[in-house]
Image (cartoon, rainbow, N blue to C red):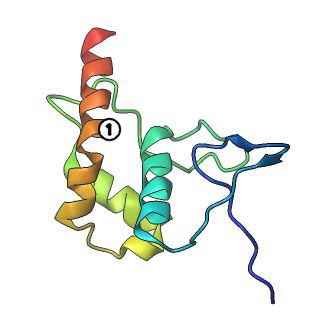
Amino acid sequence: MADIPHFAIPFRFDGPRGAVVDEQDSADEIMACVETICRYTIGDRPEKPEFGLPDQTFASPTPKEELIRSTIAVWEERVGVDVGRTILDKLSPLIQNIKVEAVNE
């Protein structure tokens, strides 16, 4: 069976076509998938309403690390059950953005 290219995340155009990932299963491609999981709130995708994180708008004082770990483990098997410190460190700017947006609203 031929490899089916994955669209690049975030979705964008590369000329007349959608951009695709150069190397599937690379750390960067897996990280992009993890970021997508963290950017969606449960219910945001009508075709898969259980996808994403529970709404963290009123998480106090910050989003729960264990909740993020367990959600990533459910949706991105390539990360493994234990989300490593490296992945969480790369997600820090995203988590910070969630905290800042929740505080500013």
Position of 62 with respect to 68 (left or right) is left
Identified by mark 1, the residue type is Leu
Q: Residue at x 18, y 28 (%)?
A: 60
Position of 62 with respect to 32 (left or right) is left
Look at the picture and state if 101 lies above or below 78. above
Q: Quadrant of residue 64?
A: top left
Residue located farthest toward the bottom when viewing the structure as drawn:
1
Q: Nearer the viewer, residue 102 or 34?
A: 34
Q: Quadrant of residue 73?
A: bottom left
Look at the picture and state if 79 lies above or below 7. below
Q: Residue at x 43, y 61 (%)?
A: 28
Q: Residue at x 32, y 74 (%)?
A: 81
Look at the picture and state if 18 lies above or below 72. above
In percent of width and height, residue 80 lies at 35, 76
Query: What residue is disc 1 on?
Result: 94
In percent of width and height, residue 47 lies at 73, 47
Quadrant where the N terminus lies? bottom right
Quadrant where the C terminus lies? top left
Which element type, helix, strand or loop, lies under badge 1?
helix
Q: Nearer the viewer, residue 33 or 48?
A: 33
**Total residue callouts:** 1
Q: Residue at x 46, y 74 (%)?
A: 77
